[in-house]
Image: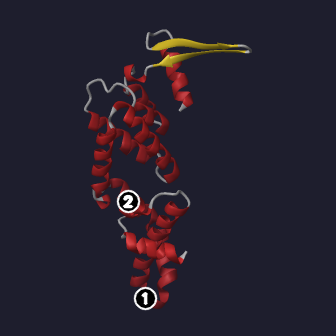
């Protein structure tokens, strides 16, 4: 995030948006610019299209744009940009939630998060793409695990086991909550707990 602020500071150094300030002590002389993020158009950060810049956009001026639309864009782009990196997404979400309180947007953020969570994942194009990309891997896992029970049961079991394995990794390695992972992957909390107890 620091590089985004430095870039922004360089762009705004001649503008009134940045206020010069300094600290002078014995053996210490430090100058810095104070940037009022509320005066900067959020579009600058949205166009950077990086997770850190998107998170900082929540602090900026939405310039009359609907708050829920901007938040929805930020959340969906964060999910797309951090796909496959649950830890980065978790860090971005925590920071976004914290920064949203600065503009009293925490309730709208919570509402948009809930709306996106309630969407049927199977209907999203990204879900279909993920299924296509991983189908072969899941099928082969299912076949090797389910030969004694039949090929059709093995395929189903392989897909299920792949999802459970991913869920367990998300919980243990990335420290996500059981409830969040269960909701995101459409798994029952009890079933997930049962598999976690076996580990």
Q: What element carries label 1?
A: loop
How are the residues colored? secondary structure
Question: In front: 116, or 97?
Answer: 97
Q: Nearer the viewer, mark 1 or mark 2?
A: 2
- Of the numbered discs 1 and 2, the one sitting upstream in the chain is 1
Residue 165 in view of the camera: yes
Q: Is residue 163 left or right of residue 28?
A: left
- Which disc, if any, is residue 119? none
- Which disc, if any, is residue 150? 1
Horizontal and vertical percent position of residue 126: 37, 54
- Quick one: label 2, few (<14), some, or many (20+) residues within 10 Å? some
- Which residue is painted at 48% across and 37% down in the image? 50
Disc 2 target residue: 184
- Are dots 1 and 2 in contact, CB under 8 Å? no
- Quick one: label 1, few (<14), some, or many (20+) residues within 10 Å? few
Q: Which residue lies furthest to the right in this view?
A: 27
Q: Residue furthest front?
A: 26
- Which residue is painted at 39% across and 57% down in the image? 129
Q: Quadrant of residue 183?
A: bottom left
When the figure is inspected, residue 17 is found, relative to residue 196, above or below; the finding is above
Horizontal and vertical percent position of residue 133: 45, 61
- Which residue is painted at 47% across and 39% down in the image? 51
Q: Which residue lies furthest to the bottom in this view?
A: 148
Question: In front: 199, or 74?
Answer: 199
Quadrant position of the C terminus in the picture: bottom right
When the figure is inspected, residue 174 is found, relative to residue 197, above or below; the finding is above
């Amino acid at each position: 995030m620091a590089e985004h602020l430095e870039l922004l500071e360089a762009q705004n150094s001649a503008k009134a948006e940045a206020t010069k300030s300094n600290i002078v002590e014995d053996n210490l002389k430090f100058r810095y610019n104070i940037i009022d993020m509320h005066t900067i158009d959020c579009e600058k950060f949205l166009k950077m299209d990086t997770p850190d810049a998107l998170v900082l956009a929540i602090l900026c001026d939405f310039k009359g744009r609907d708050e829920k639309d901007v938040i929805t864009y930020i959340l969906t782009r964060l999910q797309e940009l951090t796909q496959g990196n649950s830890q980065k997404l978790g860090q971005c979400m925590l920071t976004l939630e914290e920064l949203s309180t600065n503009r009293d947007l925490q309730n709208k953020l919570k509402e948009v998060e809930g709306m996106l969570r309630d969407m049927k994942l199977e209907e999203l194009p990204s879900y279909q793409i993920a299924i296509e990309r991983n189908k072969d891997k899941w099928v082969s896992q299912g076949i090797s695990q389910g030969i004694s029970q039949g090929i059709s049961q093995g395929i189903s079991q392989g897909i299920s086991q792949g999802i459970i394995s991913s869920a367990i990794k998300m919980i243990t390695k990335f420290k996500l909550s059981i409830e969040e992972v269960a909701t995101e992957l459409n798994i029952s909390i009890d079933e997930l707990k049962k598999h976690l107890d076996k580990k």
